[in-house]
Amino acid sequence: MIIGTAGHIDHGKTALIRALTGVNTDRLKDEQERGITISLGYAYQQLADDITLGFVDVPGHEGLIHTMVAGATGIDYAMMVVAADDGIMPQTIEHIAILSLLGLTQGCVVITKQDKAQPEQLAQTQAQLGQALAHTFLGSAPQFIVDSLSGAGIPALSDFLQQQAHQQKMTNRSGLFRLAIDRAFTLSGQGTVVTGTVHGGVFDLQSGDIKLRLMPANTPIRVRSIHAQSLPSTNAYAGQRCAFNIANIAKETIERGDWLADERCFTPSIRVDVQLQLLSNLAQPITTWMPVHVHLGAAHVMAHVVPLSKETLQAGEQAYAQLVFDSPQCAMPGDRFIIRNAQAKQTLGGGRVLDANGPDRKRRTPARLSWLASIANYLTDQQLPPLLSQAPYGISYPDLQRLIHGDVEQLVILDSALWVKPTTNKQSAVMMDKSQWEALLSQIENTLEQAHLRYPDEPGIGADRLRRMTAPAMPISLWQSALQTLVQAQRLKLQGAWYHLPQHTVSFSEQEQQLAEKILLLSHQGQYDPPWVRELASLLEIPEQEIRQLGRKLVQQGKLYQVQPDLLYHHQHIEQLAQLLRQYPKNQGIKAAELRDQLALGRKRTLQILEFFQRIGYSRRLHDRHVIRPDNMLFTS
């Protein structure tokens, strides 16, 4: 269990920890000479049953609130310290607010310097505490009166904390591993060492299953050794304070607030959508683009606030907002944060992260606010179905992994949900509400029905055009899955590159059938250089318009492909060309000149063929090469 102190400067936090553990957490010379805590200090106490008490000593000076927040983030238990002779002081109130905003629910109150207070002073301090803590998580917390120098009251407090540690519910270790770095230094002969609190998961040095990265720099990390709770260890897990000796990373490249994290944890972003709770003592409202200091994890950075629920936020309000940072930051849904004013003199509020990768546009729409409300509800009640019902395109595997802070494979698939897996790559999978999925499939069918009425002579709609007509914002992998599902269920048909409803068919008169066979024969004989419509009209002695009308019907049946206006290829030759392109390595593709030489065609005709394959979504251009799209479903059989 990690216990964090809080309270005003010179109220005896460091002396209290020294009395409990025998460790002086003021390790810096300047701290010892001046008698004040400047940086975070740590002490550990080994108990029975392999339980370790960890203490985080934070500074109480108003100018070091950023250090206090860095230490308070990630603790399990708060120990609010108030001097009996001074009573409630400014940083006492601010620290109480910060602990509440960070989501702490457990703690105790310790009144120190018992020897320096008269009975009436002690009673006054207790009365002040009763008022200040009445509506906080410490309102009914146990209180202890101690004298750290003489040891009076220390045994009772120590016994209580040990009892709490034994009763503490084990921290969930099934999540993705991440450690918030609050200190980096160099040890002679060992190299760079970073310390911090583990916010989630387990890292086993010996297994090598998890790949760690320094974030947000996204630098791969190799771990040499671990100290957990000040003892050598082969693993680190959620709730521990740990030190990692890492290789090939200079101390100067690491800042407080960086993370050592599983590579699946973060996608750094400058926009983070949050649920913001403002304190009731704000001197001025929160307005759009107001600069603030943000304390997130162990980081202390500047950002601008963009209220989403309304233009201006008043004291005591709770609302949705977006924090816009100057540089990419890392967070996960549910992470707690604190904001302070631009002068870093007053705590304004805090809350929790909802979406760590907020949008730049349409961030205030009713749909977006409804989505943020659904995330907030999920973080509170952990019920996934209501959240999925608000996600028209489902939740992707990586996003779901970050949302639950853990292994998606452990999720029990709900009766109301299903996995949509477009490929064997699970990172492309999407979990969707079944009713949302069926509504999406029906929407595609309705779009095609309207298109057939409007363009009865067209063979169907290409995949890209159909997506633009139906749901242009839909992720491409989900779109491909929807089309594949409809085709497999025979709710759609794919003729060549065109999708159409099964009832959208073409019939020929006897005269048209005879002419169609002649057109197909001439097109087939032309192989990769078939005759143009004007040439077909001349050979068959038929008007060009009649050839075009019949050609459209043959395209609709999938027997011809229109490579260019008035240039129709036999389906067998297009299929052969498609397989020819597929023979080249996926990442290399083919140059136009290479295909020209292989087909013995002119450059212009070769480019027309390549542009056709790009247009129907079979290939794409990559610099001067043409590569097959991995997500296409054309010419696969």
Image (tube, rainbow, N blue to C red):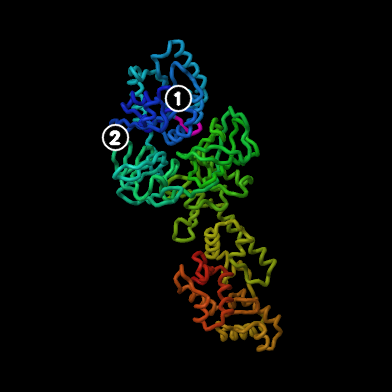
- Does residue 536 lie above or below 155 as drawn? below
Q: Which amino acid does label 1 sit on?
A: Ile
Instruction: Please count the marks in the image.
Output: 2
Name the residue nearer the viewer: 314 or 175.
Answer: 314
Residue 388 vs residue 247: left or right?
Answer: right
Residue 389 vs residue 40: left or right?
Answer: right
Name the residue nearer the viewer: 530 or 430.
Answer: 530
Residue 126, percent from left and from top? 46, 16
- Provide the residue span drawn in magenta: 100-105
| Residue hosting label 2 | 50
Question: In this orientation, does residue 49 appear?
Answer: yes
The local secondary structure at tag 2 comes to loop
- Per the image, is 633 magenta? no
> Which-is-in-front pick, marks 1 and 2?
1
The answer to whether mark 1 and mark 2 are in CB contact below 8 A is: no
Name the residue nearer the viewer: 484 or 97.
Answer: 97
- Determine the residue positioned at 45% across, 73% down: 584
Residue 240, percent from left and from top? 36, 37
Would you say the magenta stretch is mainly helix, strand or loop?
loop
| Residue hosting label 1 | 9
Residue 167, percent from left and from top? 36, 30
Residue 403 vs residue 310: left or right?
Answer: left
Name the residue nearer the viewer: 241 or 507.
Answer: 241
- Determine the residue positioned at 43% across, 17% down: 84
In the rendered view of the protein, which quadrant contains the N terminus? top left
- Does residue 283 lie above or below 242 as drawn? above
